[in-house]
Image: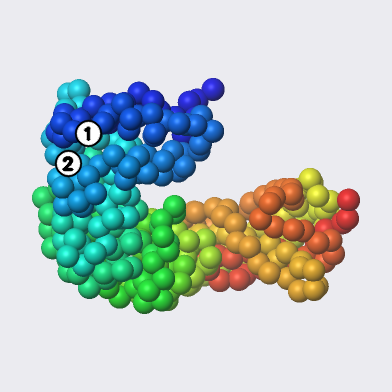
Amino acid sequence: MPEPFKNLFNVSVIRTMADHLASVEGNFDSEAFVAFATEGLERLEFKERASRLTDALEQYLPHDFARAVRILCSALDPNPEDQQLPPQGIRGWPVMSMAEFIARHGQAPADVPKSLNALKDMTSRLTSEFAIRPFLINHPQLTLETLRTWVTDDHDHVRRLVSEGTRPRLPWGLRLKDFVKDPSAVIVLLEQLKDDPSEYVRRSVANNLNDIAKDHPDRVASIAQTWMIEADKNRQRLIRHALRTLIKDGHPGAFKALGYESAHIDVLRFSATTPNVRMGEDLAFELDITSKIKTEQALIIDYAIHHRRANGQTTAKVFKWKNIVLKGGASLSATKRHTFKHITTRRYYPGLQHIEILINAKSVAKADFELLPN
């Protein structure tokens, strides 16, 4: 079995962290720190262990914030990029707890500049994407001004902190509600990073745009269309990744951004070949289409299941099927099976349901089927 994720914070890692802290601060009580941080460790999950380690830093670092920051930054590995060398300081998962210490105790207005500089130093040893978010909430103007200077930083980890730290809906991170409502300030930063030389940064830009698309789909589709103008392969790949949710949802603007125009096809036949389905069984369906034009066309073929709800209405859920290039005058025959199985995120109700075929985000055919009670 693979090692549990929580064991990334283990006694050995914590003891090594304590040794590095003691090497730069002679009065640091490393034994007491380790004892505090590892008490009941086996009972704690990953985030609880990270939080416990931050609690230990609170307990054993000096209460003077400026002095505590100097100790933490001085204990960082001076060569984080050279993975061939043994660590000469702290890097990896303990940095998550160090950054959280900065987020907890560095919010006083006079401390914010040194806090942000500390997070900048720490991010290249792991990431500060979670810890910077309280500063965006509590000190948005100063933090955004700082991030605007980081978009041209020499270090790709720092540039990625700009794009990843400002994601409105970062998993595990605080929700940036102001950016959920109006992402304009974030988009300005992403604009400057869209052609970053690092794939690590560009991937983060794409994930940020995908976050924004969940609340502002039309705006992201419009941005994608603009960015696609004279885009090189790297930017095209970024845009495709950024539009993944919109494509799955069948947003027409997203399809247009990726060059998928309205499909010129005729549907010769579409049917649900298993019109009665029980839970655990498959809905089978068949589709025959033919091209109406002489030139080839790129097609994204998806299908939507219109699930019945408790009130008798239906709601659609889109599923991916095929991406093809249909030659001029050619035809396509395709079959598919969709399994109905219990999942925690959806409750199924028996009765009349529908399946719909979407080609380049446009509905081209529908069929009914009956979901039978068990």
Q: Amino acid at mark 1?
A: Phe
The answer to whether 318 appears left or right of 231 in the picture is right
- At a point 41% along the width and 71% down the height, the residue shown is 177
In the picture, the disc for residue 28 is: 1
Q: Position of residue 242 (x, y in %)?
A: 38, 60
Q: Amino acid at mark 2?
A: Ile
Task: Say if 272 sits above or below 226 in the image.
Answer: above
In the picture, the disc for residue 349 is: none
- At a point 24% along the width and 49% down the height, the residue shown is 63
Mark in front: 2 vs 1: 1
- For the residues bearing labels 2 and 1, Cβ distance under 8 angstroms: yes
Q: Quadrant of the N terminus?
A: top right
The answer to whether 183 appears left or right of 288 in the picture is left
Q: Which of the two residues, 120 or 361, is positioned nearer the viewer here?
A: 120
Q: Quadrant of residue 108?
A: bottom left
- At a point 42% along the width and 30% down the height, the residue shown is 38
Task: Say if 221 sits above or below 196 in the image.
Answer: below
Q: Which of the two residues, 115 or 296, is positioned nearer the viewer here?
A: 115
Kindly identify which residue carries mark 2. 71
The answer to whether 354 appears left or right of 195 in the picture is right
Number of residues whose C-alpha sits closer than 10 Å to that of mark 2, classed few (under 14), some (14–19) or many (20 or more): many
